[in-house]
Image (cartoon, grey):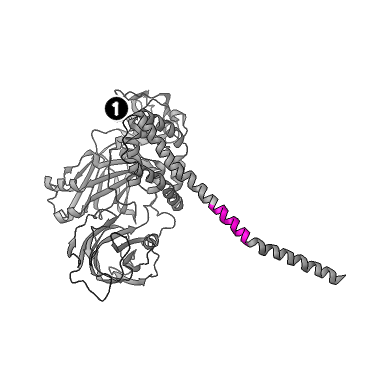
């Protein structure tokens, strides 16, 4: 007989969850919960093409045989569901194939009423989850106010029957689960120096409230429900929050931020800055379970069921930073005096680093200029940046002209002769005093589906593959992390590997930004890229753990990687082409006798008519 009681979980804060197996009638079974939702909106706040907000959020629940991964028959689920602290429904569902899919739709027309409509086995709702798994499911449509806007969806699930509807389990199997769907809220900002801007908060846990931004101190505050009990922290594998900031908002292009939760400062590695998205930067705040315990035990969990966030500029990283359009270089810049004024001397200090070489300063040809909003050039110089680790800074000194005020741009162009190796960073001349005004309402609230990140790394250690990041939707995707770890922990540890990466980057950056932009616009291209990357990721897994202690080990490793991938990317397409040609030839051969007979019969018919008319 099955084990009883509530099974442990670790899914709060993540977008999918698989519970440990339990014994049921002599076999091991497990509960799996997964989600499918649209990707985050573009910078404008509009959802991507083909996505209908409120109709595309799905959460699937399946009871599977742990060994064969086949869903069980005749499963009865008893489910109580909540969104945050809001009760949704509590009822029993039968699933002939052991698989339920809940389609959550936002409907504000019926007030606070929640409607649950069981579509039956197969259902009448479009179900991408069961389609991808190849399993027929029972579809349940749940509609109500803001149900598809994201947040923490809590499920208290009991397995009442499994294998036979007529035999109810003496001790039902209980599961306490929480699935997080990104909730995106965009706040309009009227800044006295930078004009109309926005700050977007993406929460992978629960709905935020009390958003505040102080443009003088550049401090951001907001709060979020969170229960600090042992049981809830045990289920919260990670709390993941993001800020999305337009690259026109110079005050928030800082190279580092500090994160405080309930007045407890978190370690620097909790913060990750991602500048690889066109038009905006993403700042990740990833708080793992052990840090949640540290916050609470350090006195930060005394407030009832609340998590107060304070995000401040890191005093050790006061420079502004930006990544070039082709993704290869990260530029850091600061200036003296701290408040730039027209008619006074100015000193711009900058550093040029290579993203894919762990942020090392490099010697690169550059063209630097300072321009105004109308495109007028204040100052320009060309040179070669220093690669000195002891003194990696480069300096441009000039007098700021009289009458120049407002927004100006620090422009870096043609790094290493690459036309796409360019970036601009907005700064302020003659700064205006006064605070920014925050729009009390939101510009837009939309559900997203990047998935919850589970790994963090220091922003100074470099970025990831542009194409892979666009394909998997996040710098934090496990596949992108795998590629990054290969680069940092294996390839760049040898001279051969470093030389290879330098040569590879010179080619890769000529096309990867354009491909990444196309991927973000077309879901089909993203799916094709994932398929194309799979053989390479598999080959890396096969060679995982290879000992590389010398340059020759690196050479042998590289040849092995090339050989494995060559077998897939070259031999496999050739084999498929040969097989297709053989089948086409057989098809033609099978049809040829029939075709020949028709030609003969046609000719005989024509000859007969000719004889008749003579």
Q: Is residue 324 above or below residue 63?
A: above
Q: Quadrant of residue 406?
A: top left
Residue 191 image position (x, y, % from top left): 32, 43
Q: Is residue 462 magenta?
A: no
Task: Say whether residue 458 is visible.
Answer: yes
- Indicate the position of residue 119 as horizontal and vertical percent values: 36, 71
| Quadrant of the rendered image containing residue 351 | top left
Place residue 430 in its image quadrant.
top left
Q: From the viewer's perspective, is residue 139 above or below residue 439? A: below
Q: For mark 1, does the 10 Å Cα neighbourhood hold few (<14), some (14 to 19), or many (20 or more) residues?
A: few
| Left or right: 156 in relation to 363 | left
The residue tagged 1 is 337
User: Was residue 582 drawn as part of the magenta stretch in this picture?
Assistant: yes
Q: Which residues are magenta?
A: 579-590
- Asked which secondary structure carries label 1, the reply is loop
From this viewpoint, which residue is outermost toward the bottom?
Answer: 166
């Amino acid at each position: 007989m099955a084990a009883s009681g509530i099974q442990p979980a670790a899914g709060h804060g993540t977008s999918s969850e698989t519970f440990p197996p339990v014994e049921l009638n002599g076999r091991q079974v497990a509960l799996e919960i997964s989600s499918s939702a649209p990707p985050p909106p573009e910078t404008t706040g509009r959802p991507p093409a083909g996505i209908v907000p409120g109709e595309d959020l799905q959460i699937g629940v399946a009871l599977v045989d742990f060994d064969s991964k086949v869903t069980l028959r005749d499963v009865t689920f008893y489910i109580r569901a909540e969104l945050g602290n809001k009760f949704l429904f509590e009822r029993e569902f039968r699933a002939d194939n052991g698989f339920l899919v809940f389609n959550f739709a936002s409907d504000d027309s019926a007030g606070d009423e929640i409607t649950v409509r069981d579509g039956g086995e197969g259902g009448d709702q479009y179900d991408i989850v069961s389609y991808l798994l190849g399993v027929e499911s029972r579809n349940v449509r749940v509609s109500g106010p803001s149900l598809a806007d994201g947040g923490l969806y809590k499920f208290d699930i009991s397995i009442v029957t499994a294998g036979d509807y007529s035999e109810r389990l003496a001790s039902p199997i209980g599961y306490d689960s929480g699935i997080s769907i990104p909730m995106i809220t965009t706040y309009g900002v009227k800044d006295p120096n930078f004009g109309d801007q926005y700050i977007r908060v993406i929460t992978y846990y629960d709905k935020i409230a009390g958003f505040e931004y102080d443009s003088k101190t550049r401090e951001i505050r907001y709060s979020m429900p969170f229960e600090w009990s042992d049981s809830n922290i045990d289920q919260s594998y990670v709390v993941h929050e993001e800020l999305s900031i337009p690259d026109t908002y110079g005050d928030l292009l800082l190279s580092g931020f500090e994160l405080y939760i309930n007045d407890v400062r978190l370690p620097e590695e909790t913060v990750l800055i991602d500048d690889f998205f066109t038009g905006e930067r993403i700042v990740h705040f990833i708080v793992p379970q052990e840090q949640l315990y540290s916050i609470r035990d350090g006195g930060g969990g005394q407030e009832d069921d609340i998590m107060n966030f304070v995000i401040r500029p890191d005093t050790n990283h006061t420079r502004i930073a930006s990544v070039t359009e082709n993704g290869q270089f990260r530029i850091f810049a600061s200036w003296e005096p701290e408040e730039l004024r027209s008619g006074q001397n100015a000193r711009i200090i900058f550093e040029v680093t290579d993203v894919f070489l762990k942020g090392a300063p490099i010697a690169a040809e550059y063209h630097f200029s300072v321009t105004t909003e109308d495109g007028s050039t204040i100052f320009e110089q060309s040179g070669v940046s220093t690669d000195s680790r002891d003194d990696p800074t480069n300096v441009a000194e000039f007098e700021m002209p009289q009458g120049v005020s407002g927004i100006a741009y620090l422009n870096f162009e043609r790094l290493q002769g690459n036309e796409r190796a360019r970036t601009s960073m907005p700064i302020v001349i003659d700064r205006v005093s006064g605070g920014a005004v925050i729009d009390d309402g939101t510009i837009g609230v939309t559900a997203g589906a990047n998935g919850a990140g589970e790994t963090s790394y220091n922003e100074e250690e470099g970025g990831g593959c542009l194409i892979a990041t666009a394909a998997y939707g996040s710098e934090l995707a496990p596949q992108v992390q795998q590629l990054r770890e290969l680069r940092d922990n294996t390839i760049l540890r040898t001279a051969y590997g470093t030389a290879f990466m330098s040569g590879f980057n010179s080619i890769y950056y000529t096309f990867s930004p354009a491909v990444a932009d196309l991927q973000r616009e077309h879901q089909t291209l993203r799916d094709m890229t994932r398929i194309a990357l799979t053989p390479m990721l598999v080959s890396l897994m096969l060679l995982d753990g290879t000992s590389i202690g010398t340059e020759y080990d690196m050479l042998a490793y590289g040849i092995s990687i090339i050989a494995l991938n060559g077998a897939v990317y070259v031999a496999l397409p050739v084999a498929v082409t040969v097989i297709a040609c053989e089948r086409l030839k057989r098809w033609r051969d099978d049809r040829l006798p029939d075709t020949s007979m028709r030609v003969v019969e046609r000719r005989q018919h024509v000859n007969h008519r000719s004889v008749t008319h003579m």
